[in-house]
Amino acid sequence: QVQLVESGGGVVQPGRSLRLSCGASGFTFTGFGMHWVRQAPGKGLEWVAVISYDAFNTYYADSVRGRFTISRDNSKNTLYLQLNSLRAEDTAVYYCAKDLGGNLSDAFDIWGRGTMVTVSS
Amino acid sequence: DIVMTQSPATLSVSPGERATLSCRASQSVSSDLAWYQEKPGQAPRLLIYGASTRATGIPVRFSGSGSGTEFTLTISSLQSEDFAVYYCQQYNAWPPLYTFGQGTKLEIK
């Protein structure tokens, strides 16, 4: 079935780095843009970044631009998020999500269950 | 940036009754509006996109309406499994900058 599974979360000290992964199955990964969305404890959803189906285009929220990098390996059906210079306010559950369409102007129709990132000394 | 404001923050409704949730955009987003349902420990689920189109597998008791800056999600007859947090989201901005509302918690009265 259609599925997204995140991994790579954990506890990390401020200023350090972490790489999250999201494995996709059950759909044509190469046909869709992919997103990362996060949710801080007790808070709402915050969009983080998007990458086009061909990896040519990437866009970021102001809160992470310059620190986080989204990428994808279409040969492995996997999405990544490199988190650098982590701050306490980056503590959140990180979800990957699939774009409904192919043009980055659509809703997110498939979500993973998330991976927790805790930034703490 | 486009700011999405949901109301009320919490809505208490009895099972079998109708629930109406509102979402307002700080500027027009045309019909580029989605609604999501979130339950504890589960992935968010897409309910409505294009302001009024039900996503695959979503029951007909969920309906969306509106365009421009004012949107509504209606659940016609609440079932026990519908008590959750609901978010609206705009995807109209270009370059892409997707924003969510702060959520409405739908609780059992």
Image (tube, coloured by chain):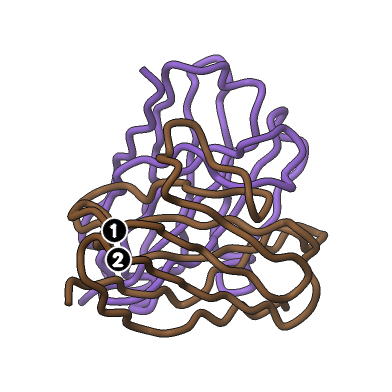
Chain colours: A purple, B brown
User: Which quadrant of the rendered structure holds the N terminus of chain A?
Assistant: top left
User: Which quadrant of the rendered structure holds the C terminus of chain A?
Assistant: bottom left
Q: Nearer the viewer, residue B22 or A82?
A: B22
Q: Quadrant of residue B94?
A: bottom right
Q: Earlier in the sequence, mark 1 or mark 2?
A: 2
On screen, residue A113 above or below B25: above
Q: Secondary structure at mark 1?
A: loop
Query: What residue sits right under mark 1 in the picture?
Result: B78
| Residue B6, horizontal then vertical, whole percent | 51, 79
| Residue A13, horizontal then vertical, whole percent | 27, 69
| Residue A33, horizontal then vertical, whole percent | 65, 36
The residue located at (33%, 33%) in the rendering is A5
Query: What residue sits right under mark 2 in the picture?
Result: B17
The residue located at (78%, 70%) in the rendering is B68
Q: Residues within 10 Å of mark 1 (few under 14, many from 20)?
A: many
Please report contact status of discs 1 and 2: CB closer than 8 Å, yes or no. yes
On screen, residue A48 above or below B20: above
Q: Residues within 10 Å of mark 2 (few under 14, many from 20)?
A: few
**Chain at numbered mark 1:** B
* Amino acid on which disc 1 is placed: Leu
A60 left or right of A64 in image = right
Q: Nearer the viewer, residue B68 or A61?
A: B68
Q: Are marks 1 and 2 on the same chain?
A: yes
| Residue A98, horizontal then vertical, whole percent | 53, 37
**Chain at numbered mark 2:** B
The residue located at (77%, 38%) in the rendering is A103
Q: Nearer the viewer, residue B66 or B86?
A: B66
Q: Secondary structure at mark 2?
A: loop
Q: CA distance from mark 1 to mark 2?
A: 6 Å
On screen, residue A58 above or below B75: above
* Amino acid on which disc 2 is placed: Glu
**Camera-nearest label, 1 or 2:** 2
